[in-house]
Amino acid sequence: MEKSNNLAVLILAAGSSSRLGESKQLLKIRNETLIEIALGNALKISSNVIVVLGYNSDKIKDKIKDFPIKIEINPNYKEGMGSSLSYGISKLEKSNKVLIMLSDQPLIPLSHYLKLIKKSEENEDIIICSKYQNKFAVPSIFPNKYYSMLKQLKGDKGARNILEENPLDFIPLDDKYSIDIDTKKDYLNLLNNMV
């Protein structure tokens, strides 16, 4: 598969996992941590991959130090996802667009990311997002004309308002793949359903 040089991938992995009680980025599924699963997909898509860390960054950084990626630590990660998203965008090197993904959605298949990219190549100027649970959401691809808007995000507000207020197209994602892990129960359910 040909990697895109014009597409950066930004993985948000800074959260404190307060409801889980431990770093969700380091939870394992089939002997791989969630952050490694996310990186595995990202590196099949682009050689320009940035991970934004925050909580427990030393331990997570140590786990992923051998990947060919750029690691950024958001000093204000406690403010929430919007803060980490704007911080990550501010650290992007030149790229025509960015694919934003989360580290806690391990079931999203590579094929879904590839469909997002294909649709983005057919619609260069608009946002291409995922749609699941009747919502537009990440993973999403933003052309660089939206970078300034993304940089202005603050606190815990992610990119949803930008998705709702601007032209976009979407790729549907089956709800069963959209699961994100916020609690111990989510994690155990996920493991049980994979048996």
Image: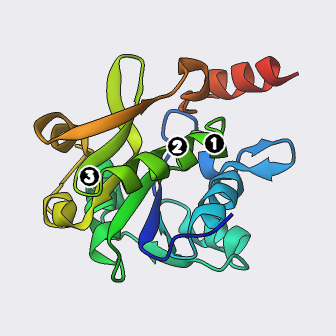
Q: Residue 145: horizontal and vertical position, in percent?
A: 17, 65
Q: Which amino acid type is marked by label 1?
A: Ser
* Residue where numbered disc 1 is placed: 111
**Res. 115 mark:** 2
Does the residue at mark 1 contact the one at mark 2 (Cβ under 8 Å)?
yes
Crowding at dot 2, Cα within 10 Å, few <14 / some 14-19 / many 20+, comes out as some
Q: Residue at x 65, y 46 (%)?
A: 110
Can residue 15 be seen from the camera position used here?
A: no
Relative to 47, residue 56 above or below: above
Judge left or right: residue 106 versus residue 149: right
**Dot 3 or dot 2, earlier in sequence:** 3
Against 102, residue 95 (above or below) is below
Q: Are circles 3 and 1 on residues that touch, CB within 8 Å?
A: no
For residue 88, which quarter of the picture? bottom left
Query: Hey, what amino acid is under mark 3?
Result: Gly
* Residue at mark 3: 82
Looking at the image, residue 80 sits to the left or right of residue 50; the answer is left
Residue 141 in view, yes or no: yes
Give the total of numbered labels. 3
**Label 3 Cα crowd, 10 Å radius (few <14 / some 14-19 / many 20+):** many
Number of other residues with Cα within 10 Å of mark 1, as a class: few under 14, some 14 to 19, many 20 or more: few
Q: Nearer the viewer, residue 34 or 168?
A: 168
Label 1: which secondary element: helix
Q: Position of residue 100 (x, y in %)?
A: 41, 54
Instruction: Determine which of the numbered discs, if any, sits on residue 123 in the image.
Output: none
